[in-house]
Amino acid sequence: MQNPVPSKFSFEVLIDDSFSNFSSDDLEPVENKNVLSLINDFEDGSWRYSKFQNFIWDNIAETALSFRERESLANQSHSSLVAAAKNLRLTDKDKKDIGKGSELAEILLYGVMKHHYNSLPIVPKIFYKQNAQDNAKGSDSVHIVIENEDSFSLWLGESKFYDSIADDRLDSIVQSVFNALQKDKLKKENSIITSVSDLENFVKNSKLLENIRDLLSNDNSIDDLKPFLHIPILLLHECPLTKSCRSLSQDYKDSIIKYHKERAEAYFRKQITKLKDVIFKYSEITFHIILFPVPDKSEIVDRFISNVEHYKGQG
């Protein structure tokens, strides 16, 4: 995997490690599992809501607009935001609390994929969900990472925004991952990727482009794809530790590290128990759990919706 590029990233990385380095001895397989813990910082005694929202809006156009739309609006940042806002479904207003913030989490995962994992935005997922209902189901994020001039990996992401990541909330995440790994879902994602023109716009190496198309072709077995497949699972979550904190102290960082390691173990224990015997070649798929704590889910979602409605009103 390519090295992260922290200089381009807005948030501090507390954990970026293989799960095998701190998992319990009784868990297996733990290879091909990774943990990424990210935190925002504080200013004047408060969590930096504006910095978080700025990161969301800095990345919103690339996941809500097609490559051609983004190119046509180059150097027109305000126009890009207005156009992107129009493509947001804003179903958050109608959902119960458990489902609110879904689009916001998708955009955050997109930004993490771009800035931390150096991914290519092959399928701007919010754009396709808005503009082609047949494509709306499936992974929340679809990216390709160029490992070197001869190889690549395919990343099919899941993103959640929860008010808690207690044990009873983890089962639904495992179920989402299970659903995404079904043969028909994988073949559908592959078909979408190979049918959009963005693939040629980003992959300039003609041999590598041919290899990508060959591996993702419906003529090939999904089994051949499993060693190239990565599943990033973003858990954006309300966190009492973050809510009670007023500065980016070492005590706070240590508490989050401990908490996220414990939550990663709880999640992977459930995933291994439920999936290792029902997903063929499970041990060959790479999984990444990405944890990001916030102080107040409702306030973040409400601010996001308010900003989207503001830009929608300017169209």
Image: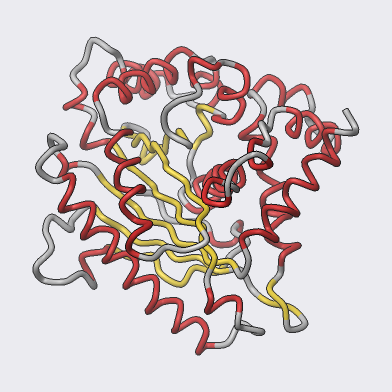
In this image, 299 relative to 268: left or right? right
Relative image position of residue 93 (x, y in whole percent): 68, 41
**Residue 209: image location, x then y, percent:** 40, 21
**Residue 47 vs residue 30: left or right?**
right
Q: From the viewer's perspective, is residue 312 above or below residue 57?
A: above
Residue 157 visible: yes
Q: Which residue is drawn at 30% across and 49% down?
A: 287
- In this view of the protein, which residue sits in the foreground, 203 or 123? 123
Q: In this view, does 300 lie to the left or right of 228?
A: right
Instruction: Tell me which colouring the rendered structure shows.
Output: secondary structure
- Quadrant into which the C terminus falls: top right
- Most distant residue in the right direction: 314
Q: Which of 17 and 149 is in front in this view?
A: 17
Give the x, y percent position of residue 155: 38, 38
Q: Reply above or below: 10 against 121.
A: below
Write the residue at 13% across / 38% down. 278
Residue 112, above or below 157: below
Above or below residue 141? Residue 237 is below
- Within the image, what quadrant is residue 79 found in? top right
Q: Which of 135 and 228 is in front in this view?
A: 135
- Residue at 39 percent across and 36 percent down: it is 156
| Numbered label tally | 0
Position of residue 34 measured from the top left corner of the image (x, y, whole percent) = 31, 58
Q: Can residue 207 be seen in this view?
A: no
